């Protein structure tokens, strides 16, 4: 039986006002009132036992005799996946804003809002909508599936496809062949005998899928669909924040723009469950939604996207000829190239764990896999912001989350707001001076061995998931030898370029590489800040350099 998700509203003094405000959601959510913390606790206990999903908890601040933060913390233990909002009447809002500052900063409360004083307080409802949107994207089972995966078993390829489709924002369901949905999908196929699994159905196609690239091609096509005699003004290689910003600004300024992405649009940032320090999003935004909004913005200006096709070679143009970016799905010719391929997580290098990738072992945040961690103990390896965001998201589902780092602590590698959020979450524990040295399982990950480096003591623990977000390595082996890299493989730009490669004893402009007409932006560039906002800024600013180069070529 499928239950309608609920919004639980706790208020002692303004229940009627809140219920009238939340009436607009009653068609798709069950809005349930309660007037005391004890009643709310008992109500939620019953709902959890009955399997009724809770999307949003709303608490009217202040609560008599107890701190609002304490109330939400207790309720959070019962329903860790629910989003949490505190509201306050104008009489208490100024003082409440002071009292709620720390709980909001450490993630104990997702939003603190002024209680609406009349009709159509759309700023209030924007906040509600964002919280419900985030819950539906990360917790709820999709009501309308844009894609269905039909398979008799949840194998590694199925998990990879589900992760990719989650990252591109496609609501997806996984169904057995003998299920009602499975039978409907298979009936659309024109094939005899048993098909190769998995079978994937979209709105216009149905058939077996053999790889993530196969799925990406169905959605976005192949680079060789571009007429070979057509030359783009600029090809952007990589669709992370830097590449997306470059695409938006280039295409909005009239440049014919093509974007190539080896995986999913959004890049590594697209796997972040919640980016809370990005300018203009006070309640945060998921990396997936940020990436998809940027993609739609770029498409509106005419950008062409092709995903699943990594660049395998870059052939610089000579004597005014266009540059050629080579992929296994066709070549793209462009007058200018922006390299925005970012970085990849470093491999752990433990053979027994590499064999379990996709079966409990994941590189990156693996958003789709988080729901499978319910009731399990999981380990996150890494000390950067991506690792912290992954730990917070996993803690909504997992019984416990252990963050393992080689350093003493997280202070030198993670933003302060995330450290506070980890410290405030009772399900998360940080282990400094530790590393994963072994692990295994029969068919999926079942155990890990940790080594505490200060004592050399080894500890074996039972786990259900391992999420690896370690290191940052550029992927630049496809670039030509004349393009200068530093000793770690990052692209050199501006004054970083060796002096013997300067033209007329002048250094290249910032973000310009050692090859005229080829630029770099974001994490792949040597000396970049490795933050979403800085990558976006570099992607936007590189477009003026592209314009300057193209103008010079025309002259």
Image (cartoon, rainbow, N blue to C red):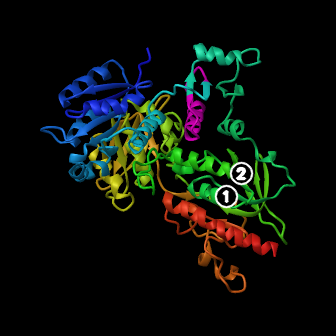
What residue range appears in magenta? 150-172
Q: CA distance from mark 1 to mark 2?
A: 8 Å
138 on left or right of 341: left
Quarter placement of the N terminus: top left
7 over 195 or under it: above or below: below
Q: Residue 525: in sight, yes or no?
A: yes
Residue position marked by numbered label 1 in the rendering = 252
Q: What is the number of callouts on the image?
A: 2
- Crowding at mark 2 (Cα within 10 Å: few <14, some 14-19, many 20+): some
Numbered label attached to residue 50: none
At horizontal 25% and vertical 31% (from top left) the residue drawn is: 15
Give residue 289's position: percent from left, percent from top. Answer: 52, 44
199 on left or right of 447: right
Give residue 324's position: percent from left, percent from top. Answer: 79, 59
Residue at the far left: name it.
65
At horizontal 18% and vertical 38% (from top left) the residue drawn is: 63
The local secondary structure at tag 2 comes to: loop
Q: 455 or 540: which is nearer to us?
A: 540
484 over 101 or under it: above or below: below
343 over 544 or under it: above or below: above
552 on left or right of 496: right
At horizontal 76% and vertical 43% (from top left) the residue drawn is: 222
Could you say which quadrant of the image residue 130 lies in? top left
Please say whether residue 160 is one of the residues in the magenta stretch: yes
Quarter placement of the C terminus: bottom right
**Mark 1 or 2 closer to N-term?**
1
Q: Residue 489: in sight, yes or no?
A: no
Please say whether residue 229 is one of the residues in the magenta stretch: no
Give residue 509's position: percent from left, percent from top. Answer: 64, 76
Residue at the far front: name it.
118
Numbered label attached to residue 302: 2
245 over 216 or under it: above or below: below
């Amino acid at each position: 039986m499928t239950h309608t998700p609920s919004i639980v509203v706790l208020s002692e003094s303004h229940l009627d006002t809140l219920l009238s405000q939340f009436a607009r959601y009653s068609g798709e959510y069950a809005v349930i009132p309660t007037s005391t913390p004890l009643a709310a606790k008992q109500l939620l206990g019953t709902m959890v036992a009955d399997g009724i999903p809770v999307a949003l908890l709303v608490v009217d601040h202040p609560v008599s005799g107890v701190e609002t933060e304490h109330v939400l913390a207790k309720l959070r233990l019962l329903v860790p996946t629910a989003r949490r909002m505190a509201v306050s009447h104008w009489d208490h809002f100024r003082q409440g804003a002071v009292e709620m500052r720390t709980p909001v900063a450490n993630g104990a409360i997702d939003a603190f809002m002024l209680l609406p004083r009349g009709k159509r307080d759309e700023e209030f409802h924007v906040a509600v909508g964002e919280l419900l949107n985030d819950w539906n994207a990360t917790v709820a089972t999709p009501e309308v599936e844009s894609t269905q995966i039909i398979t008799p078993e949840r194998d590694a390829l199925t998990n990879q496809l589900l992760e990719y489709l989650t990252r591109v924002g496609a609501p997806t369901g996984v169904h057995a062949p003998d299920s009602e949905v499975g039978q409907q999908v298979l009936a659309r196929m024109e094939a005899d005998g048993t098909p190769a699994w998995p079978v994937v159905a979209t709105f216009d196609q149905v058939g077996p899928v053999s790889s993530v690239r196969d799925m990406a091609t169905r959605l976005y096509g192949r680079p060789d669909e571009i007429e070979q005699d057509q030359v783009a003004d600029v090809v952007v290689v990589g669709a992370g924040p830097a590449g997306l910003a470059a695409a938006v600004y280039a295409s909005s300024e009239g440049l014919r723009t093509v974007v190539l992405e080896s995986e999913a649009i959004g890049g590594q940032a697209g796997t972040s469950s919640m980016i809370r320090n990005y300018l203009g999003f006070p309640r945060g935004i998921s990396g997936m939604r940020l990436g998809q909004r940027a993609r739609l913005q770029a498409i509106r200006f005419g950008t062409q996207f092709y995903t699943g096709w990594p660049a395998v070679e870059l052939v610089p143009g000579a004597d005014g000829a266009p540059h050629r970016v080579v992929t296994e799905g066709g070549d793209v010719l462009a007058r200018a190239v922006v390299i925005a391929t970012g970085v990849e997580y470093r491999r752990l290098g433990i053979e027994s764990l590499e064999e379990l990738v996709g079966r409990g072992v994941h590189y990156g945040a693996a958003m789709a896999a988080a729901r499978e961690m319910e009731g399990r103990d999981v380990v996150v390896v890494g000390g950067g912001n991506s690792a912290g965001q992954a730990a917070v998201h996993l803690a909504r589902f997992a019984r416990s989350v252990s963050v393992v780092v080689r350093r003493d602590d997280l202070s030198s590698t993670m933003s302060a707001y995330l450290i506070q959020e980890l410290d405030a979450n009772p399900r998360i524990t940080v282990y400094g001076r530790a590393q994963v040295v072994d692990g295994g399982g029969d068919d999926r990950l079942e155990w890990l061995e940790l080594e505490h480096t200060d004592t050399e003591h080894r500890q074996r623990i039972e786990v259900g998931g391992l999420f690896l977000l370690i290191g940052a390595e550029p992927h630049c082996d496809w670039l030509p030898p004349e393009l200068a890299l530093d000793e770690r493989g990052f692209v050199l730009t501006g004054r970083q370029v060796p002096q013997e490669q300067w033209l007329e004893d002048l250094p290249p402009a910032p973000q310009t590489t050692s090859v005229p007409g080829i630029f770099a932006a974001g994490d792949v560039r040597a000396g970049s800040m490795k933050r979403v906002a800085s990558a976006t800024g570099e992607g936007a600013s590189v477009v003026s350099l592209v314009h300057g180069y193209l103008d010079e070529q025309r002259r």
